[in-house]
Amino acid sequence: MSRISVIGAGAWGTALTVSLARRTEHQLTLWAHTADHAKELFVSGENKRYLPGFVLPATVNVTADLAAAVEGAEIILFATPSQSLRPVIQQIAPSLKKAQVLLSAAKGIEEKTFLRMSQVLCEFAPENPIAVLGGPSFAQEVAAAMPTALTVAIDNEPLSKRLQDDLGSASLRVYRNDDVPGVELGGALKNVIALAAGVVTGLELGHNAAAALITRGIAEITRLAVACGGRRDTMSGLSGVGDLVLTCTGNLSRNRTVGIELGRGRKLEAILASLNGKVAEGVRSTTAALGLAARYGVEMPITEQMNAILLDHTSPQEAIRELMSRPGRTE
């Protein structure tokens, strides 16, 4: 039995809570950003805003009090949008106990600092054990107990085994890894490539183009991950190619959906407004990814063109032409 607090009551945080609740021995708390949302969750037993149709068990303690949510927790699982993690950890850091495990399930790169989520957590809680969760996982399918495999990464074998056991269930298989930067960057950068894959779909460029983009996308991700200290083999696992394929091809992918609409000619502002408060992490991670790539001298042509589209500096059609007209090279 573990006392686990999930920070963030969006679709992903709710899905993870529903999944964890299948292990009835856990004591679970779910933190919602506002009191109104917490009340809705408590009264209805369902997250009608972000993950409708799934019962939130009555055994889950729902609160909007952040300090109360983390008090006494053995594992604090962060499922906030990546750009919201800093103010959350900054608020709770003074009250953290050193033994509390901080687990990031957010998939993004901080926009202004180019930091990974584990690095943001470490900035405020350097003495706490910090782990990350990655892999191909749509929230709806996790909540529905459809078979899913994820990776938990931490450079601490005993804690890695404990997290593997605590998170796993009959429908959720968890693998261990010690490559924290690799798992994180695989999860963050695939969102950028998924935007581009959506553009290809929106432009109706065919399956050949989509396959080429995904394949060259994993090459970009691998180059940057390795430059940042990740391992090449991690990119062939669940948090690399697994998450990339899902997000680039699945109809539940918000990043792919945004890309499709961009390819069809819609403006970014209108597309984001239509998400009704849900977040497409790739939109804000694209600029951050380029900043990180510049820091390490890594070439990322797909990411560069995706950023130009997002900033409205180029059209999707012109971005494709730029990619197709690059000088020849070896694979």
Image (tube, rainbow, N blue to C red):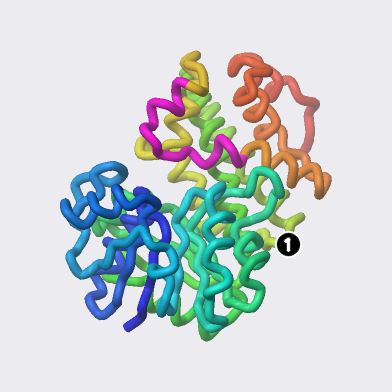
Q: Is residue 185 above or below residue 66?
A: above
Q: Is residue 49 left or right of residue 90?
A: left
Q: Position of residue 157 (x, y in %)?
A: 56, 82
Up-down relation of residue 260 to residue 33 (above or below): above
Looking at the image, which is closer to me, 189 or 71?
A: 71
Mark 1 belongs to which amino acid?
Gly
**Residue drawn at point x = 70 percent, y = 49 percent:** 114
Say few, some or many: other residues with alpha carbon within 10 Å of mark 1 (under 14 / 14 to 19 / 20 or more).
few
**Which quadrant of the view contains residue 52?**
top left
Answer with the quarter of the image where residue 63 lies.
bottom left
Residue for badge 1: 229
Q: Is residue 233 visible?
A: no
Decide if residue 171 is on the left or right side of residue 174.
left
- Quarter placement of the C terminus: top right
Taking the image as drawn, is residue 313 in sight?
A: yes
Number of numbered callouts drawn: 1
Picture residue at 42% right of the left edge, 36% below the top:
254
Task: Tell me where the magenta segment starts and ends, as one range.
Answer: 270-285
Which percent across, then down, holds residue 60?
Answer: 25, 67
